Image (cartoon, grey):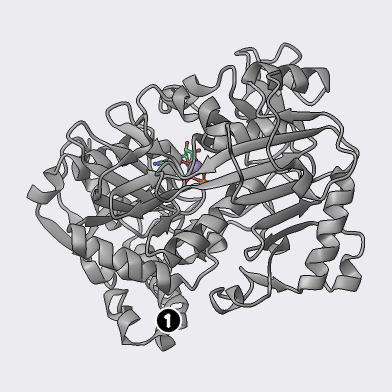
């Protein structure tokens, strides 16, 4: 361990701090994980941990402190729940008490690759694998940058404690993730899941950047040999990570980006890929990234450490985090110029939307504000119907400001840089979930290649009824062009037409929330028309 110690330890409100493990190397972290029985090693030398009761985030336990002047900015509601300053103070005390008298992992890192827009983050935790997760996911400072690193924001992770007074506080559960944007502090308790830290800092970036006129986005990004940049927006499971990881294009990042006057930049220094049913043939780069320094979560393995990626008995949400350097073809500075293309990914389990369609400007705003995908039924008995999910800007859970603020910024930038926008359905074809099948990654990639090599611009287009989406009739690289029009792929045309109308009605109903947003957001005309 280097002898370096973090600056400002005395300002953390912690008493009798034990040993401080500051920005440990990967080798040290692995040694800690093994010696403290936190992890097992996979046959490829990757640390494997279980994240405890929580194998996903707990969005209903996330709060922002309700205080002036920031309470004027925040879009209060079920996504951004207010919490009183006094309760926050109590939870800060609970958190600091838990972390006092302990050996602590202190990890300093950047959020944001662009020096003009990044923030300095400090995460404090008792758990080695959490420090490992933070090291993988955030941007790793150089030794020189650590010399006088003074954090802009401090996140305390006291996952081993809970809020036992939650009922008295009028809160939902004993789990808490509370953000104080005035004091630049977050406190977490009750959940060990790393995603709370990752998406917590993402939420803060989504707060800070738009207030500086910069866009913050839940999207992946890559760049071609000619410097052409593509963004892939989409909710969880729609393919941001899978599709941005492309041997022919340099990866900028797989999940969170900013867009300022210079171009696009990653917030993170690593990727967080789903590994359920991971197939090395269709996702060779991600498969290859699972090696020493990566961190596997909640996977099932045998006594020798061989992982069974098909086993979902711990969770469907099995994951691996890895530093972006594990993807050979990545953009070293994690930045690029302005986007040429934007793709909205959706996993339409109704099987209605075309695998690829071209959007005009108004449609782009409509589909961005709608943020549609569909979830397939969980394990509940007898449920086979897909469930539509609308999440504004493809990530409303992470937006502290009103969605229209982000839409405004995106719209301006699309105009300014003449960006082409497409909707790509990575979901079902040949029928809904239960009848049809998921689009193959190969076909989806062919659609995306057609966008990126410009061949889609030479195609003739059909119009999808009701939705008025422009569908290319042919596309280079797509084996069988009949898949391009979803109606062709359904055995029963009546069933298709009926499902299309049903989905159109859901879009319309969801979009009513923008009716009162003023003429600037009157994009209903760009949506489906019944
Ligand atoms: P999150 O925001 O949770 O990280 P994501 O948008 O990055 O989600 P991915 O991790 O890329 O989503 O997940 C897409 C999943 O769907 C992967 O497990 C991938 O193997 C699978 N998949 C199946 N068919 C397709 C397809 N046609 N296109 C993209 N992914 C597909
Ligand atoms: Mn992802």
Q: Residue at x 43, y 37 (%)?
A: 242
Badge 1 is on which residue?
Answer: 514
Q: In this view, does 38 lie to the left or right of 264?
A: right
Quadrant position of the C terminus in the picture:
bottom left
**Where does the image place residue 66, in percent across and percent down from the top left?**
68, 74
Q: Which residue is drawn at 46% across and 79% down?
A: 509
Give SS at disc 1: helix
**Where does the image place residue 198, in percent across and percent down from the top left?**
60, 46
Crowding near the residue tagged with mark 1, few <14, some 14–19, many ≥20 C-alpha atoms within 10 Å: some
Whether residue 383 is visible here, answered yes or no, is: yes
**Is residue 328 depicted above or below 198 in this figure?**
above
**Is residue 337 depicted above or below 107 in this figure?**
below
**Is residue 333 depicted above or below 39 in this figure?**
below
Q: In this view, does 51 lie to the left or right of 404?
A: right
**Where does the image place residue 52, in percent across and percent down from the top left?**
79, 40
Work out whether residue 500 or residue 458 is closer to the camera in this orientation and state it: 458
The image quadrant of residue 101 is top right
Q: Which residue is drawn at 54% across and 52% down?
A: 202
The image quadrant of residue 406 is bottom left
**Where does the image place residue 53, in percent across and percent down from the top left?**
79, 44
Q: In this view, does 54 lie to the left or right of 72?
A: right
Quadrant position of the N terminus in the picture:
top right
Whether residue 468 is visible here, answered yes or no, is: no
Q: Residue at x 64, y 41 (%)?
A: 316
């Amino acid at each position: 361990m280097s002898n370096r110690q973090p600056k400002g330890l005395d300002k953390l409100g912690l008493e009798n701090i034990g040993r401080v493990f500051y920005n440990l190397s990967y080798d040290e972290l692995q040694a800690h994980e093994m010696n403290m029985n936190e992890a097992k090693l996979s046959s490829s030398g990757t640390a494997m941990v279980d994240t405890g009761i929580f194998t996903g985030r707990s969005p209903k336990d996330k709060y922002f402190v309700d205080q002036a002047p920031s309470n004027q900015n925040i879009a209060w509601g079920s996504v951004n729940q207010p919490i009183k300053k006094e309760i926050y103070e109590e939870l800060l005390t609970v958190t600091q008490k838990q972390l006092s008298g302990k050996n602590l992992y202190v990890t300093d890192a950047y959020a944001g690759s662009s020096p003009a827009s990044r923030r300095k983050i400090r995460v404090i935790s008792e758990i080695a694998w959490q420090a490992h997760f933070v090291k993988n996911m955030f941007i790793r400072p150089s030794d020189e940058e650590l010399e006088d690193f003074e954090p802009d924001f401090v996140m305390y992770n006291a996952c081993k404690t809970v809020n036992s007074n939650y009922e008295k506080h009028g809160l939902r559960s004993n789990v808490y993730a509370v953000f104080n944007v005035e004091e630049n502090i977050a406190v977490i308790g009750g959940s060990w899941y790393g995603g709370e830290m990752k998406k917590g800092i993402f939420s803060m970036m989504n707060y800070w950047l738009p207030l500086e006129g910069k866009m913050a986005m839940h999207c992946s990004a890559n760049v071609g040999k000619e410097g052409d940049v593509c963004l892939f927006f989409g909710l969880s499971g729609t393919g941001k990570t899978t599709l941005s990881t492309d041997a022919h294009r340099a990866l900028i990042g797989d999940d969170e980006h900013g867009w300022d006057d210079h171009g696009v930049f990653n917030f993170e220094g690593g990727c967080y890929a789903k590994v359920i049913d991971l197939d090395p043939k269709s996702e060779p780069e991600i498969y290859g990234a699972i090696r020493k320094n990566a961190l596997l979560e909640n996977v099932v393995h045998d006594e020798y450490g061989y992982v069974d990626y098909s086993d979902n008995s711990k969770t469907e949400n099995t994951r691996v985090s890895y530093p972006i350097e594990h993807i050979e073809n990545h953009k070293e500075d994690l930045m690029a110029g302005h986007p040429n293309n934007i793709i909205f990914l959706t996993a339409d389990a109704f099987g209605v939307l075309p695998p690829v369609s071209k959007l005009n400007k108004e449609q782009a705003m409509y589909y961005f504000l709608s943020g549609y995908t569909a979830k397939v039924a969980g394990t509940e008995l007898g449920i086979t119907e897909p469930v539509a999910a609308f999440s504004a800007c493809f990530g409303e859970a992470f937006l502290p400001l009103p969605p229209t603020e982000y839409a405004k910024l995106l719209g301006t930038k699309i105009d300014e840089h003449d960006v082409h926008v497409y909707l790509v359905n990575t979901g079902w074809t040949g029928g809904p979930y239960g009848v049809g099948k998921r689009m193959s990654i190969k076909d989806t990639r062919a659609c995306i290649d057609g966008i990126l090599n410009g061949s889609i611009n030479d195609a003739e287009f059909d119009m999808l009824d009701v939705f008025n989406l422009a569908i290319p009739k042919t596309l280079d690289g797509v084996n069988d062009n009949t898949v391009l029009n979803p109606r062709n792929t359904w055995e029963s045309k009546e069933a298709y037409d009926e499902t299309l109308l049903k989905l159109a009605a859901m879009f319309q109903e969801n979009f009513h929330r923008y009716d009162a947003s003023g003429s600037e957001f009157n994009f209903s005309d760009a949506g489906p028309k019944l």
